[in-house]
Image: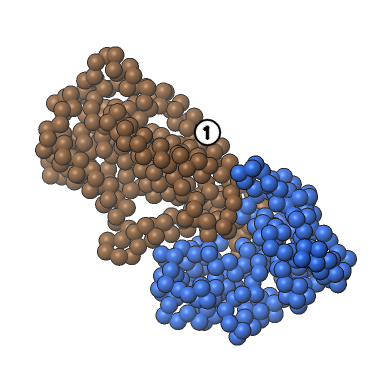
C-alpha cells in the first residue's frame, strides 16, 4: 500500500517558497490503478516524484509498504556519454539485479540493434524513449508510476509498450498522471483530479472526468 | 511486507547499509566510466593523473632548487607536500555542483545526494592514495627516496588529511547547490591556500610569529604530521592532532547538515 497523509510541497522561487501541493491525501492499494488528471502546471509531476521518493515532502507523511518504481518513461535519466548497455548496467547495479541476463530483453524490446552499444548522446529522441521504456521494464515493482507515457515511439511501439505494461503487469498497482482523460479512462479503475496543487477525489471515473471538464472549461 | 528486486520496503539498518553500499558501488563504477571511459588507459587515469601532477611539481621544485627552509631531499618534500594538496584541493572541486550532472540518477529513490558525494570522495581519495603509494615505492626503488620512518604515522596523517578534504568537500559541495558564488570563490581560495598549506615549506623554518598564524590552517597540521612520519628524525614538526581533529569534525558536521539541506530541497528536472 502507498499512503500519502496531509502532504505539502513547497518549491523555492525568487519571491519565496511557493506551495505546489497542498494537503494531499492519497491511498493506493496493491493492484489498484489510479489515474490523476491535471492540466499543465497543476503539480502532477511533482506529486509523482514525491510518491516515488525522489523528492521529499515539505510536510506530511508518505508511507510505502510495497516497492514503487521511479517515474516511468522518463527519457532524461541517462548518462549521455555512456552506451545504452552501460546505462542498463548502472540501473541494474543500483537495484541490485543481474544485468547480463536482462540484456537480451532490452536488446529485443528496444529494437536498438547495434546502437545499444553506442553512446546515448548519439540517439534520436525516439531511440532514447525506447531504451528508457525497455530499461524500466527490467526491474520488477509492485507499483508503477507513469508520467505521461503516451508519447513513446510510433504507434506499433506504443502498442508493444501498452502490452508489456498493462497486460503482462496487469496485476500491479499503478499511478498514472496525465492531462489526457481518454488515456486515464482506458487504463484506470479510479481517478482523482489535481487542481492548483489540491487533489480532489471523485466517487467514480465519470464523476472525475466531469469535474476535470469543468475545471478546464473555467480556465478556457 | 513485500520486498521485490529493488528491496526498497523500509527495513532495518543492516538493509539500509546494504542498499547504500550497492548504490555507492554503482555510482563509483559509473563515475569511472564517464570520467575515464574505455579508451586508452581507461581507469588507470584515476591515479596516473595525480601522479603526473606530483612528478611535475617534484621536477619543477628540483630544477629550481626551491627554497623550503631545510636540507631535506626535495623529492621527499614534494611527494609528501603535493600528495596532501591533492586531497584537500581535489575533493571539494569534485563535489562542487555535483548534483546537476546526476539529476537523472536522483530519480531513483535509493540514490541520495550523500551517495553521489561519497562516491566522488572515495574515488578522489583512491586516486590520490594510489598515486602516493606508487610514487613512494617508485622513488624508493630508484633510490631517490628513503622509506618512511614511521609508516603508521604516515597512514594516520594521510587519513586525517583525507578526512579534512572530505569534510571540506561535503560542506563546500553542498553549499554550492544553494549559491553559485561558492564555486566562484573556491577557485581563488584554493589557489591562494596552496602556498600557505605547508606543502612547500616546513613550519619550523618560519619565524615564530608566522608559525603561530600559519598553524591556524588545519591542513598545515596534517602535512607536518605526514612529514614527521616520513623523516621525523631530520626535522622538528609543529602540529596539534586535536586541533586538526576538531576542525575535521566540525567541517564534517556542517557538511552533513548542508547535504541534508540539499536532500530536502532537491528539485529535479
Q: Please say which color scheme the image uses.
A: by chain
* Secondary structure of the residue carrying numbered label 1: helix
Count of residue discs: 1
Q: Given the current orientation, which residue lies at the most extreme top position? A: B209
Residue at the bottom extreme? A156
Q: How busy is the neighbourhood of tag 1: few (under 14 within 10 Å), some, or many (20 plus)?
A: some
Residue at the spot x=62%, y=67% of the render? Answer: A72
Residue drawn at the location 53% of the way across and 48% of the way down: B113
Q: Position of residue B61 (x, y in %)?
A: 16, 36
- For the N terminus of chain A, give its image quadrant: bottom right
Farthest-out residue, front: A220
Chain at numbered mark 1:
B
Horizontal side of B20 relative to B77 (left or right) equals right
Q: Hey, which quadrant is residue B158 in on the image? A: top left
Where does residue A102 sit, x and y in percent of width and height?
Answer: 52, 74
Q: Percent position (x, y) of residue A187?
A: 75, 75
Residue A59: image quadrant is top right
The letter of the brown chain is B
Q: Which residue is mark 1?
A: B253
Q: Residue B191 at x, y = what percent? A: 31, 36
Is B18 placed above or below A76 here?
A: above
Q: Looking at the picture, does residue A163 appear above or below residue A91?
A: below
Q: Which chain is blue?
A: A
- Which quarter of the figure is the C terminus of chain A placed in? bottom right
| Residue B175 visible (yes or no) | yes
Q: Is residue B35 left or right of residue A212?
A: left
Amino acid at each position: 500500500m502507498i499512503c500519502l497523509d496531509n502532504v505539502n510541497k513547497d518549491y523555492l522561487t525568487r519571491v519565496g517558497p511557493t506551495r505546489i501541493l497542498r494537503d494531499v491525501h492519497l491511498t493506493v492499494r496493491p493492484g489498484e490503478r489510479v489515474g490523476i488528471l491535471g492540466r499543465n502546471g497543476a503539480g502532477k509531476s511533482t506529486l509523482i516524484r514525491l510518491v516515488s521518493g525522489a523528492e521529499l515532502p515539505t510536510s506530511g507523511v508518505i508511507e510505502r509498504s510495497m516497492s514503487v518504481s521511479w517515474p516511468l518513461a522518463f527519457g532524461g535519466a541517462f548518462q549521455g556519454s555512456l552506451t545504452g548497455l552501460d546505462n542498463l548496467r548502472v540501473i541494474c547495479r543500483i537495484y541490485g539485479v543481474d544485468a547480463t541476463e536482462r540484456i537480451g530483453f532490452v536488446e529485443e524490446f528496444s529494437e536498438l540493434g547495434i546502437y545499444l552499444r553506442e553512446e546515448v548522446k548519439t540517439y534520436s529522441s525516439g531511440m532514447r524513449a525506447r531504451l528508457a521504456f525497455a530499461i524500466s521494464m527490467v526491474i520488477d515493482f509492485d507499483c508503477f508510476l507513469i508520467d505521461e507515457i503516451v508519447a513513446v515511439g510510433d504507434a506499433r511501439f506504443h502498442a508493444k509498450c501498452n502490452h508489456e505494461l498493462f497486460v503482462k503487469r496487469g496485476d500491479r498497482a499503478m499511478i498514472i498522471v496525465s492531462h489526457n482523460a481518454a488515456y486515464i479512462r482506458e487504463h484506470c479503475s479510479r481517478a482523482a483530479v489535481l487542481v492548483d496543487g489540491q487533489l480532489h477525489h471523485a466517487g467514480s471515473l465519470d464523476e472525475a472526468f466531469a469535474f476535470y471538464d469543468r475545471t478546464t472549461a473555467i480556465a478556457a | 511486507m513485500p520486498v521485490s528486486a529493488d528491496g526498497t520496503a523500509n527495513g532495518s539498518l543492516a538493509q539500509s547499509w546494504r542498499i547504500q553500499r550497492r548504490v555507492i558501488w554503482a555510482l563509483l563504477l559509473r563515475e569511472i566510466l564517464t570520467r575515464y571511459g574505455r579508451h586508452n588507459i581507461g581507469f588507470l587515469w584515476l591515479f596516473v593523473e595525480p601522479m603526473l601532477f606530483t612528478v611535475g611539481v617534484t621536477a619543477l621544485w628540483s630544477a629550481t632548487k626551491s627554497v623550503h627552509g631545510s636540507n631535506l631531499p626535495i623529492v621527499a618534500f614534494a611527494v609528501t607536500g603535493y600528495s596532501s594538496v591533492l586531497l584537500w584541493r581535489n575533493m571539494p572541486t569534485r563535489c562542487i555542483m555535483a548534483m546537476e550532472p546526476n539529476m537523472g540518477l536522483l530519480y531513483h529513490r535509493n540514490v541520495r545526494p550523500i551517495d553521489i558525494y561519497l562516491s566522488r570522495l572515495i574515488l578522489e581519495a583512491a586516486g590520490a592514495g594510489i598515486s602516493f603509494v606508487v610514487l613512494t615505492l617508485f622513488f624508493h626503488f630508484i633510490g631517490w627516496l628513503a622509506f618512511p620512518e614511521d609508516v603508521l604515522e604516515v597512514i594516520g596523517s594521510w587519513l586525517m588529511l583525507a578526512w579534512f578534504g572530505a569534510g571540506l568537500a561535503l560542506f563546500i559541495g553542498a553549499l554550492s547547490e544553494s549559491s553559485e558564488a561558492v564555486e566562484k570563490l573556491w577557485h581563488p581560495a584554493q589557489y591562494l591556500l596552496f602556498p600557505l598549506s605547508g606543502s612547500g615549506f616546513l613550519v619550523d623554518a618560519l619565524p615564530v610569529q608566522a608559525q603561530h598564524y600559519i598553524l591556524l590552517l588545519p591542513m598545515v597540521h596534517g602535512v607536518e604530521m605526514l612529514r614527521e612520519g616520513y623523516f621525523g628524525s631530520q626535522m622538528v614538526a609543529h602540529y596539534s592532532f586535536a586541533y586538526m581533529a576538531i576542525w575535521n569534525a566540525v567541517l564534517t558536521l556542517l557538511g552533513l547538515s548542508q547535504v541534508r539541506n540539499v536532500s530536502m530541497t532537491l528539485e529535479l528536472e
